[in-house]
Amino acid sequence: MTLEAGLIVAAALFSVGLYGAISQQVLVMVMMGLELMINGVILAAATFWWFLAPATSGQVLLLVILAVMTLEMAMGFAVATLLHREAGTDMTDMATDLSG
């Protein structure tokens, strides 16, 4: 895989995630779009790291970032589940409990 191919795939992931995060109103779909955007950034970073300095320390750092991202998304899904159980809503514009 070349540098250009990796960056094109990363840009495609990021743009699909951006479209998903902007166009959707369901909270879970917005979070999935954000996760795709973060995965695109991680893929671009991994591609740059592989072609500039192919050491294993870079991949280990990216795996740590991926683990932190997984925890963050799990907490976000927990908040979305709590909102759905308490208020019966799953839309972003009806979730006013988090304001203020």
Image: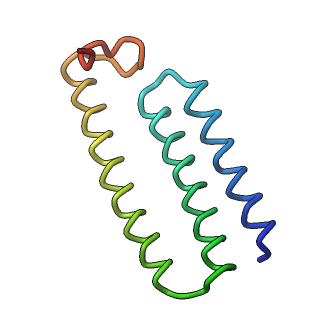
Instruction: Tell me if 68 is positioned left or right of 54 in this view.
Output: left
Q: Residue placed at 73% from the left, 61% from the top? A: 7
In the displayed image of the protein, which residue is found farthest to the front? 52
Q: Examine the rendered structure and indicate whether residue 14 appears above or below residue 59.
A: above
In the displayed image of the protein, which residue is found farthest to the bottom? 55
Name the image quarter holding residue 22.
top right
Number of marks in the rendered image: 0
Q: Position of residue 99 (x, y in %)?
A: 27, 15
Instruction: Tell me if 54 is positioned left or right of 79 in this view.
Output: right
Q: Position of residue 17 (x, y in %)?
A: 60, 41
Name the image quarter holding residue 28.
top left
The C terminus appears in which quarter of the rendering?
top left
Q: Residue placed at 25% from the left, 20% from the top? A: 98
Q: Examine the rendered structure and indicate whether residue 77 appears above or below residue 55.
A: above
Q: Position of residue 10 (x, y in %)?
A: 68, 57
Q: Residue placed at 66% from the left, 79% from the top? A: 52
Q: Please name whichever residue, 36 or 91, is drawn nearer the observer in this view of the structure.
A: 36
Instruction: Tell me if 58 is positioned left or right of 85 in this view.
Output: right
Q: Residue placed at 66% from the left, 50% from the top? A: 13
Q: Please name whichever residue, 12 or 84, is drawn nearer the observer in this view of the structure.
A: 12
Q: How is the image coloured?
A: rainbow
Q: Position of residue 62 (x, y in %)?
A: 46, 70
The N terminus appears in which quarter of the rendering?
bottom right
